[in-house]
Amino acid sequence: MIGKLFEILTEFVMWVIGGTGVSGVFFLMLAESAAIPIPSEIIMPFSGFLVFEGKMTFMSVFLAGVLGNVVGSLILYYVGYFGGRSFLEKYGKYFLFTHHDLEKTERWFKKYGSSVVLLSRMLPGVRTFISFVPGVAKMNVFKFTAYTFFGCIPWVYALTYTGVKAGENWGMLRPYFEKAEWVMAALIIGGIYWFLKKHLKNK
């Protein structure tokens, strides 16, 4: 199932970037960072392969990836900023998320938020959705943008460089990315299980 999905997404990414070049890299990374499921693990290595072929330059691909990441993250940040709190206060009870949990999360994020934003940019899966939480917590937008910018640089650079080095064999990297996604999915599911167990026990 995951393998088939990766195949479809890979063909879509190749079609978009093949037809639009660097602007396609920017918009695909923007979409990924705005929580649309188009993995950067496909976007940037394929772009690196095109650098290897001489069709694009490394710097243009790298900058497009970073800027797309920042703009997409800001979109999700503002979704959380303007509508996230009211949504959680109104519908959070259906997910066992109480007003106390919201206040606790906001306090925790105000204390550790900068580190979370910075480090989460290098974690598969988590990096896509993390921007919503700083928005809900009303983190300073300039601080959020700066940490997002610097946090995504190693990720974008590493994926692009890997694609360049892999050359025409860039597609062979897919199994490793799939394993990383599975590990992060397992951690997220474990966190959800812990959350549900704790809240159901309290109730």
Image (cartoon, rainbow, N blue to C red):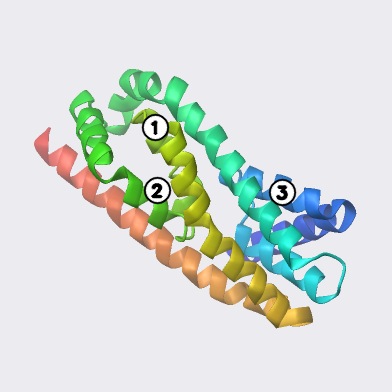
Label 1 to label 3, Cα distance in Å? 25 Å
Q: Residue at x 49, y 41 (%)?
A: 145
Residue in front for this viewpoint, 22 or 174 = 22
Mark 3 packing: few (<14 Cα in 10 Å), some, or many (20+)? Answer: many
Q: Residue at x 54, y 63 (%)?
A: 155
Q: Is residue 128 left or right of residue 90?
A: right
The residue that label 3 is drawn on is 26
Instruction: Give residue 166's mark.
Output: none
The residue that label 1 is drawn on is 140
Task: State yes or no: discs 1 and 2 in contact (Cβ < 8 Å).
Answer: no
Q: Secondary structure at mark 1?
A: loop
The residue that label 2 is drawn on is 117
Residue type at the position of mark 3? Phe
**Residue 29 image position (x, y, % from top left):** 65, 50
User: From what the image shows, is residue 59 above or below residue 138?
Assistant: below
Q: Secondary structure at mark 2?
A: helix
Label 1 to label 2, Cα distance in Å? 12 Å
Residue type at the position of mark 2? Val
Dot 1 or dot 3, earlier in sequence: 3
Check the picture and name the quadrant holding the C terminus: top left
